[in-house]
Every structure is written in structure tokens, then in C-alpha cells.
Image: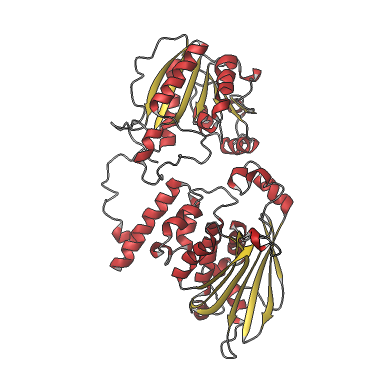
Amino acid sequence: MFLTITTTGHPERPATDLGFLLHKHPDRSQAFSTSHGTAHVFYPEATAERCTAALLLEVDPVALVRKLKGKERSTPDAALAQYVNDRPYAASSLLAVALSRVFSSALKGQCTALPARAAEPLPLRIEVPVLPARGGAELVHRMFAPLGWTVTATPVPLDARFPEWGDSRYVSLVLEGSGRTLAEALRHLYVLLPVLDDTKHYWVSQDEVDKLLRAGEGWLATHPERQVITSRYLNHRWGLARTALERLALERLAQSDDTEVEEIDNAVDESTDTEEKPVPLARARRTAIVTALARTGASRVLDLGCGQGQLVKELLADPRFTEVVGVDVSARALTVAARRLRLDRMGERQASRVTLLQGSLTYTDRRLEGYDAAVLCEVIEHVDPPRLPAVEYAVFGAARPATVIVTTPNVEYNVRWESLPAGHKRHRDHRFEWRRDEFRDWAQQVAVRHGYTVELRPVGPEDPEVGAPTQLALFRRGAAPDTESTESTEEGTAA
């Protein structure tokens, strides 16, 4: 993938000052290693009148496949992504990361040689020959034009020899303008390249909110498409997007009042704030599960679909659980879980209490037989409905632990999250989300078929109209119902 930055000048203020601002000398080419290949910086032209810096990212396709294992759902064209994809030539988050790696000082507006020049607007022309644009040329204009750029976004045909086939989702982009510093231009690219591609090649976490706000300082809070930009940059993770938009709203208010954000966001004196903060829903679920397990007297527990090991870690912290087994189909998830648990540094006695196994819940597995309890925490909604009977038999019919705990989202509660668009599921990998009556019917039928009793419990704050955000089913093999089953397991939650 390829990008060029061009500026013009004259003998008194030569265009070759671009080399100082980018911290890359025009007389030589340089190469930099990135996690997915090699970034090359060179200058096709460098005179006092005109200077062009080029960034060429040479993607290693083998390294790309290795890095993407276990993350195929986050990449375009998932079925063929390991064999055929556009990452080596189309501008994407890979190029944005290369920009921050190669031009880190320029992104911050730092230049010890020419500090005054770094703070001045430059006449700039930026060209990106192949830019994926999910939304077409019209969306490209909506992204860059409000920032003062003159935008030329030319759709790339699927095949120039067959014009009747129409245009691809790619455009050839040219940005021209003279009202921005080089640092501002680079920050626009750093944010908007992955936004237009609408995917990222790495896991998006809370850190990305801070990255977005740093790169968007001074322009994102007032951008008319800030909601689209925020959502796409954060990979449609609604909780993170909501946090970012709230902070942008504060910044916008501070700008209008000509004051600092800290002065606006001071309605509560933290030193006297005694109100209990909401409990994150994920933590509320884990607390509910651990509490229920403790009441059953279980000591040997299976965490089926353990993911990255959050629940396994919490169970290990409780000495009542003498053996904890985490099972997941994803080898990568198990690797992350091992890292989270620090298995390589764990003492021998503690390590003897935990095992991580790779396995699929749609198949019976003798390794899972004989345990006191099994937990499926936010697992069943990731299973295609036709395969649910196979999971049911593998757990309740074959493994047959004395206790089974199942949690799943309550779809009725989704209307209480303003950041979740109507009709959308909480996670794009969810195959379904059940109403309370649907979950109750399923749980009762499972219990009857396999000789269990079942109790339903809410997790999180109960809304009088739509219930709690999470629903929990406690299955006991041939046991009497728990008299405390109607208690809400947590009083507060945060999305």
C-alpha cells in the first residue's frame, strides 16, 4: 500500500523542509519494521520548489495470516481472508499504524530543527491510490471536506476492460489544501483511513478511545460525522463509542465556553462523592456465577467456552474451588487465557488447580465427565440454533455435572442501552438473543429431558418493564429448588 505527501516552496522557504518535519532525510531511503511487514520512506522528488515524501508499506502475507489466526471474523471476506484479501495493497489500519510508527514525531507536531515551521500551515497534496471506502466516494467527501480539504475521490472500476461491471468499493483519493499543519494532516489520515475501511487488524480495547481522542484533538469534537467516525474507529464496540462521544461532548462544550474540559467536568467533588459506582455487567455476571457455585458446594468446576479466562481467574482466587478447567474451541483464546492467568509464573500448587483444554461444545468429550459443576457464561447465544441440541446433549446428556449454570443476554433489556441501535444484537457474533419467556421455555425443556431442576435468576438491576440485562439459569440434577433463587445478584451495572 502506498501514500504520498507533497508540498511546494521557494528558495527562502524550500519545500525540502518537509524532510525536517518528517524527520526523514530526502537524500536517502529508509526502511522500518512493522508487525506485518516493512515500511519504506523515500522521496521521488526533492527540490526547493516541490518535495514529495512517499510511504510504501510492504505487507508480508505469511505474517498477516499468522497474525490473523483466531480473528477471522474481524477481517473482510472472512471465508477467504487467509488466502485472498486486499490488505497488501489497500490503505487500511495497517497503513495507519505504519504512519504512527514511522512519523511519530511529525504526528505530535514536534520538530527540534524547525519548530516554527512545524506549527505553520503548509500547502499540501496527499495521494492514496487505493483506499477502501465502505460508503463510497460520497462518504469520503463527508469525512475530509469538513476539515477544509479539497477532495477528489475517484471510484476504481472493478475491471477497466469491462465498464459494465461497475465500480469497486475502492477509490483513488487526492486531498489538497493549505490551511493545515503537517501534524494535523497526518492525524486526519491516522483516524480516517481505518474509518473508511471500516475494519481493524487488531483487537480494539479501551486504549483505542485515548488514541482516538488524542489524534482527534481540535477537530473531531466538531466534525459533523463524529458519531460515524467514533463508531467505526472503535470497531462498532458500542460501550467504547459511548465513552468517546461523551468525552467529545465535553470537549465541544468547553470550546463553546472558551474554557478547559476539567472546569466543565467538575459537577461532582470526587473527595465528597460517596455514591456507589455501578458494577460493570461482566463483573456482575461473574459474581453471580461464583455465588451460585459456592451455594451448591461445587469444588471441581468446568468453564465451558472460557474465552480469555476471566471467570477461570476469578474461580482460582476462591480456595473453595479445588479444580478449575477452562475449555474453548479457540487456541488463540486459550493462549490469551494462559497469559492472563500467568501460568508460566504460577506456583506449582496453584498450577495444579487449573487446566486449559481445547475442545468443541458440539461434541461429547469424556475429559469433561465427573465434575461437580459446569458453567456456560454468555456462550449459547454464539451457537447457531440448529446446533444447540448438540451442545445440550454434550453438556447435560454426556458430561452430566451435578450443577450447570447458563447465562445469556435478555434481549428485552436492549432498549435501555441508548448506544445500541434498534434491532441490533449486543455482539455481532451473537446468533440469537432470547426474551425471558424464550429462555425459560428452553431451560425448562432441557431440565425435563435430562433429569434436572432449573431456577431462573436475574443478573444486574431489574427494570420493572424489561427485566434485568442478563438472565441466569441454575440447573441441579435431581435437586430441590433454592429458596434464594429470586434474589437479584447485583444491584448496579454498566454497559
Q: Is residue 103 left or right of residue 161?
A: left
Looking at the rendered image, the quarter that the N terminus falls into is bottom right
Which residue extends farthest bottom?
Answer: 11
The answer to whether residue 236 is above or below residue 458 is below
Q: How is the image coloured?
A: secondary structure
* Image-quadrant location for residue 6: bottom right
Q: How many marks?
A: 0
Report the residue at 60% width, 39% height from top.
336
Horizontal side of 471 relative to 40 (left or right) equals left
Residue 47 in the image: above or below residue 267 = below
Residue 158, compared with residue 374, is above or below; it is below
* Residue 126 seen from this side: yes
Q: Relative to residue 269, is residue 367 drawn left or right? A: right
Image quadrant where residue 254 sits: bottom left
Residue 109 visible, this orientation: no
- Residue 464: x, y in percent? 28, 31
Residue 314 rendering spot, x and y as whole percentages: 49, 30
Identify the residue at horizontal 30%, vertical 39% (top origin).
276
In the image, 257 versus 463, the foreground residue is 463
Quadrant of the rendered image containing residue 415 = top left
